[in-house]
Amino acid sequence: MILQALVEYYEALERKEKITSPGWCRARVAYGLDISEQGELMGIIPLKKEQQNGKKTVWVPQDLTVPQMVSRSSGVSANFLCDHSGYMLGIDNKGKPERSRECFECAKKKHKDILGNISSPAARAVCRFFDCWTPDRAAENPYLMPELEEIISGSNLVFMIDGEYVHEDPDIRQCWEEYSRQSGTGPEGVCLVTGRREEIARIHGTIKGVQGAQSSGAALVSFNAPAFESYGKEQSFNAPVGTYAAYAYTTALNYLLSDRSHGTTIGDTAVVYWSEEGDERYQNIFACVSEPTMENQEIVDGVFKNLAEGKAVVAQDVKDSLDMEKRFYILGLAPNAARLAVRFFYQDSFGNILKHIKEHYDRME
């Protein structure tokens, strides 16, 4: 039920164009590699922006929509047009130069395989960059040197030409989406989420934003030892989820965890909540009543008063009343090394949830 609810939430957000489509994801990007049409590095463009963190102002990478990134725990596997310096430049701070060169060659092959047959000037520029870039001399490059320490620390990089993101080039977008649709070569089966027969995901995408879990992301569905496998089915074939559903639930959950205004933390447990059809008004009311403050006490009192009197509950600044029969979901996730543990999952009508919260406050009083 957790995955089904998340997939339905993803589809509601996609209809409202609030979330990425298959083949794309959101990633934090710190720098743009400004290249010429001949593939030469012309400069480094900082993409960080100011953000208020308590009383301090900090610089954080921008959130960009980029081609879907691969799940990596070990081995060498390149992302397309957005990756860290080991893959994009062949240099990093991990102290393993041979592996960095291997990563660069992997990225070079992937980009040339995807872009080699299209005539877009941006595509040709990226291919030429990988042909002419020399990883052994990267640390000496005058454009990299001022920001070198930060660039090789694992920050995501993207390509840019004349101030425009290469991954937003129309020809490249179309090429990538066609490649994404055709790249599936895994076994088919009945997806336990959608009920459709389709390609089954061998590895699911990672979930980011749970404090205490790996910063690169942790898995919600994962099998890493034969003791957890059945009938010879390895990895996530044990839980047959189609590639579409795997993309949808991970994208939806990452979206929820990135929304600081509609989530909270209890101890080591990250709590997210949402309504069916993705209506944020229900999240706003739940945020107020579950964590009341002096500022929103009037809203909370109004909600509970209307609830007790059987009147319609109305969201702040919205005339339409809320549907008390609307399904509402609350999920608690805790870190467990490279995986996530489900601490609790609660679902009920929105009206019943508000009723139970009011009863709790009455008993506390």
Image (spheres, helix red, strand yellow):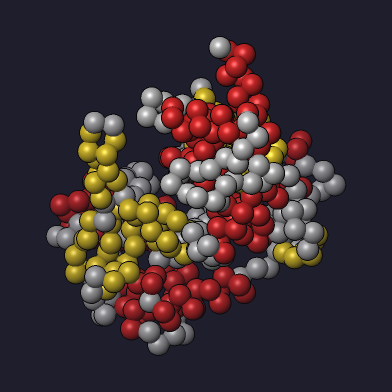
Q: Observer-nearest residue: 78 or 304?
A: 304
Is there any visible trace of residue 79 in the rendered image?
yes
- Residue 260 x, y percent position in the rendering: 43, 40
Front-most of residues 281 and 212: 281
Q: Nearer the viewer, residue 344 or 289?
A: 289
Using residue 3 as the reference point, say whether residue 132 is left or right of it. Answer: left
Report the residue at 33% width, 58% height from top. Answer: 157
- Residue 353 visible? The answer is no
Q: Residue at the right extreme? A: 231
- For the point 32% across and 69% down, which residue is it? 165
How many dots with numbers? 0
Task: Tell me if 314 is positioned left or right of 44 in this view.
Answer: right
Q: Residue at x 43, y 47 (%)?
A: 317
Percent of width and height locating residue 149 = 23, 46
Q: Position of residue 205 (x, y in %)?
A: 57, 51
Identify the image quadrant of the C terminus: top right
**Quick check: 216 above or below 162?**
above
Q: Is residue 339 above or below residue 128?
A: above
Quarter of the N terminus within the rendering: top right
Relative placement, left or right, of 268 versus 3 is left
Seen at 38% across and 84% down, the residue is 120
Seen from the viewer's position, the closer of residues 186 and 351 is 351
Q: Residue furthest bottom?
A: 119
Q: Is residue 140 left or right of residue 268?
A: left
**In this view, 362 is above or below 309:** above
Relative image position of residue 263 (x, y in whole percent): 49, 37
Question: Within the image, what quadrant is residue 202 found in?
Answer: bottom right
